[in-house]
């Protein structure tokens, strides 16, 4: 363990916003009521504000305006120890999905998830990243996908999908407008989305391709808090997009991938892109508004929508999925709360890649289950491959018999082609 | 002699520590590295987001209003009650006009003072009872939280005791509590009275440019 490196990262990460957060927290504990980990376990260690304690201690000891005075009188907080880092490790990685729901209820508006992210960066420096996340990072760097999907596997899956829908899909095609990237979970488990995109884009008259060099949208570096890995993975997509000369890169149905590429990516690579990032939900909504997507019939089942946190609450895409849902669903009912106040699936922020957190993740799903039990839908729709997988796994454990659908595929089901 | 000290040098000293201390604390935050320029393409205005966040977090949203009713009611009872007492109590107006600046508003009638004081006391006590009884607040609270609450309680209690203005000792006792409170303020979590705006603003700006203010 590298304690001094962790302390250095903690200290470096204390900018004016972090200082204002730490100085504003009044320990009211309201954030606990927004956290699915606390709510489903009652364990006070999982209180979101408590997860900021290490950062707070470093702040009070080093950069707080009072730090010097307190040190002078021997009143400064004790320095962090290896035991502290070990004690907080599961709080930082296992019991926080970076969903940011705690910010909504915080009277001070503190971005606690952002502070947990900073703490993860310190854990990276300390060499305390959960092993399964490190494994995913290694596969992402060496193979190109955190789930180990090789380019030849992708080619095979894409070819099968092209054959299924009867539309040719050409990889690495130069001169197209759009580059599609996919999450590992979509490629491996929900590959029908590729065929769905082919059908929708054909009808809308969109030229597109997939890069065999950068097909993976998932960014494990963002999840584990490793900026260097995050930058490498973003750069891979940026380089491929600029090499192909596309105008847009379509961020797929994946929560943190959108955040990684669109919101954090330019800051990681240190420049603006020569293309625009558009989320698939934004694009589908735009095409729908322009009348370029014709649908026939509607789903009559009682459908509800699970908002992926990083796309909705922390990504700003709130109305778009609802407009898409309303085009194809006759009986769309909202969970309560929904939209920017939604409850997380329990597996975001890398928690689903963290095998030691599996039991806790399943326990935390109870908060989502409660919402679903209230609404009693026939099927659950979402727009994130990871959420979809996490929801399906948890529903199996809870003996819930409910299909989980991807929104793009749902739309494609009713495409009038 | 002691009365003169409390009403003279100690008052000026504590007021100066309060003002300079608050400026020092806030500049201590602002002197730290600012967030680097965000190179992502904004969907909406960061400034509007920062402004929106200031108002949004005055009341819990997103379905939390009922769930956080205890804090909401107790918090507003205390803060509004205290705010009214500080700025509208007749003795305070007299003091402010004599020592700081002329105020353009009329003081509260006595019954108004009593109501405001009851709200403030009830709110503060409810919040403190919660702090010592709720497992979540117990886990988070530290010495500063308790000292801040007790000092504020002391200021309010001695203020009520001095309301008649008939016993000089009580008035001086209140004044002394206020001065201790002013001296403690910049070194404590009482600073949230100022830092809340920074905190809300930073979050509002960050997410406002993404088109959503959580």
Image (tube, rainbow, N blue to C red):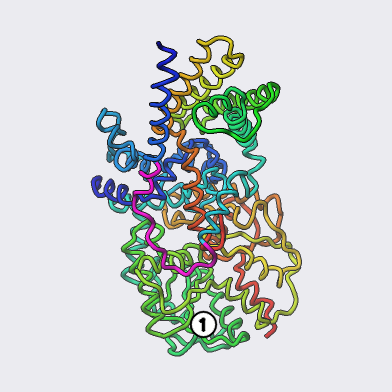
Image point (41%, 12%), residue name: B2
Tell me which residue sits at (56%, 82%) in the image: A198
Q: Which chain carries label 1?
A: A
Between A8 and A60, the one lying in front of the other is: A60
Secondary structure state at the residue bearing disc 1: helix
Query: Quarter of the image holding residue A57?
Result: top left
Residue B31 part of the magenta segment: yes
Q: Residues within 10 Å of mark 1 (few under 14, many from 20)?
A: some
> Please, is residue A327 above or below residue B67 in the view?
below
Numbered-mark total? 1
Compared to B169, does A144 lie above or below? Answer: below
Residue B117 visible to the viewer: yes
Q: Does the magenta stretch include residue A141?
A: no
**Residue A160 locus on image (x, y percent):** 51, 82
Residue appearing at x 44%, y 49% in the figure: A357
Q: Nearer the viewer, residue A18 or B21?
A: B21
Magenta stretch: dominant secondary structure: loop
Q: Give the range drawn in magenta.
A: B26-45
The answer to which image quadrant residue B36 occupies is bottom left
Q: Residue at x 45, y 36 (%)?
A: B191
The answer to whether residue A309 of the structure is visible from this angle is: no
Identify the image quadrant of the C terminus of chain A. Answer: bottom right
What percent of the width, then of the height, locates residue A348?
49, 56
Q: Position of residue B151 (x, y in %)?
A: 48, 23
Report which residue position mark 1 lands on: A160
- Image coordinates of residue B147 in percent, x first then y, are 45, 24
């Amino acid at each position: 363990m590298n304690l001094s490196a962790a302390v250095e990262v903690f200290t470096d990460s204390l900018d004016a916003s972090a200082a204002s957060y730490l100085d504003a927290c009044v320990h009211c504990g309201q954030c606990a009521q927004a956290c699915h980990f606390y709510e489903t376990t009652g364990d006070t260690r999982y209180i979101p504000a408590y997860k900021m304690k290490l950062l707070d201690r470093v702040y009070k000891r080093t950069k707080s305006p009072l730090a010097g005075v307190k040190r002078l009188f021997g009143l400064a907080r004790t320095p962090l120890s290896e035991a502290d880092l070990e004690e907080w490790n599961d709080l930082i990685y296992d019991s926080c999905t970076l969903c940011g729901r705690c910010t909504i209820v915080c009277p001070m508006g503190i971005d606690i998830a952002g502070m947990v992210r900073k703490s993860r960066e310190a854990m990276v420096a300390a060499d305390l990243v959960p092993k399964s996340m490190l494994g995913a990072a290694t596969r992402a760097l060496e193979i190109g996908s955190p789930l180990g999907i090789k380019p030849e596997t992708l080619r095979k899956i894409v070819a099968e999908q092209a054959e299924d829908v009867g539309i040719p899909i050409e990889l690495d095609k130069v001169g197209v407008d759009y580059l599609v990237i996919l999450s590992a979970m979509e490629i491996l488990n929900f590959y029908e989305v590729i065929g769905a995109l082919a059908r929708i884009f054909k009808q809308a008259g969109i030229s597109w391709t997939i890069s065999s060099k950068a097909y993976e949208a998932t960014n494990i570096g963002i999840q584990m808090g490793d900026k260097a890995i995050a930058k490498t993975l973003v750069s891979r997509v940026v380089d491929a997009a600029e090499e192909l000369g596309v105008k847009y890169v379509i961020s797929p149905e994946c929560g943190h991938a959108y955040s990684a590429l669109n919101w954090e990516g330019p800051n990681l690579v240190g420049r603006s892109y020569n293309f625009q990032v558009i989320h698939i939900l934004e694009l589908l909504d735009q095409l729908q508004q322009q009348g370029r997507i014709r649908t026939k019939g509607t789903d009559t089942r009682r459908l509800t929508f699970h908002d992926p946190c990083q796309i909705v609450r922390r990504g700003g895409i709130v109305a778009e999925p609802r407009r898409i849902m309303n085009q194809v669903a006759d009986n769309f009912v909202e969970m309560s709360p929904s939209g920017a106040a939604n409850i997380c699936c329990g597996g975001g922020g890398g928690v689903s890649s963290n095998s030691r957190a599996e039991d806790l993740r399943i326990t935390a799903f109870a908060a989502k289950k409660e919402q679903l039990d209230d609404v009693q839908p026939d099927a659950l729709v979402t727009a994130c491959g990871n959420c979809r997988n996490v929801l399906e796994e948890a529903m199996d454990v809870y003996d819930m018999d409910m299909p989980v659908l991807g929104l793009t595929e749902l739309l494609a089901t009713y495409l009038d082609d | 002699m002691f009365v003169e000290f409390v009403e003279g040098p100690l008052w000026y000293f504590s007021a100066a520590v309060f003002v300079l201390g608050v400026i020092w604390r806030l500049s201590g935050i602002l002197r730290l590295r600012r967030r680097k320029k965000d190179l992502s393409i904004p969907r909406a205005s960061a400034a509007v987001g920062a402004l929106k966040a200031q108002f949004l977090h005055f009341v819990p949203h997103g379905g939390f209003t009922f769930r956080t009713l205890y804090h909401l009611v107790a918090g507003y009872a205390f803060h509004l009650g205290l705010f009214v007492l500080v700025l509208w109590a007749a003795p305070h107006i007299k003091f402010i006009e004599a020592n700081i600046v002329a105020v353009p508003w009329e003081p509260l009638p006595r019954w108004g003072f009593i109501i405001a004081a009851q709200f403030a006391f009830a709110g503060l006590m409810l919040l403190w009872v919660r702090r010592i009884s709720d497992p979540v607040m117990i886990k988070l609270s530290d010495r500063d939280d308790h000292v801040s609450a007790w000092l504020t309680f002391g200021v309010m209690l001695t203020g009520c005791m001095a309301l008649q203005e008939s016993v000089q000792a009580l008035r001086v006792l209140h004044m002394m509590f206020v001065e201790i409170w002013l001296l403690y303020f910049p070194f404590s979590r009482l600073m949230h009275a100022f830092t809340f705006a920074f905190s809300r603003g930073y979050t509002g700006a960050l997410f406002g440019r993404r088109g959503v203010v959580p």
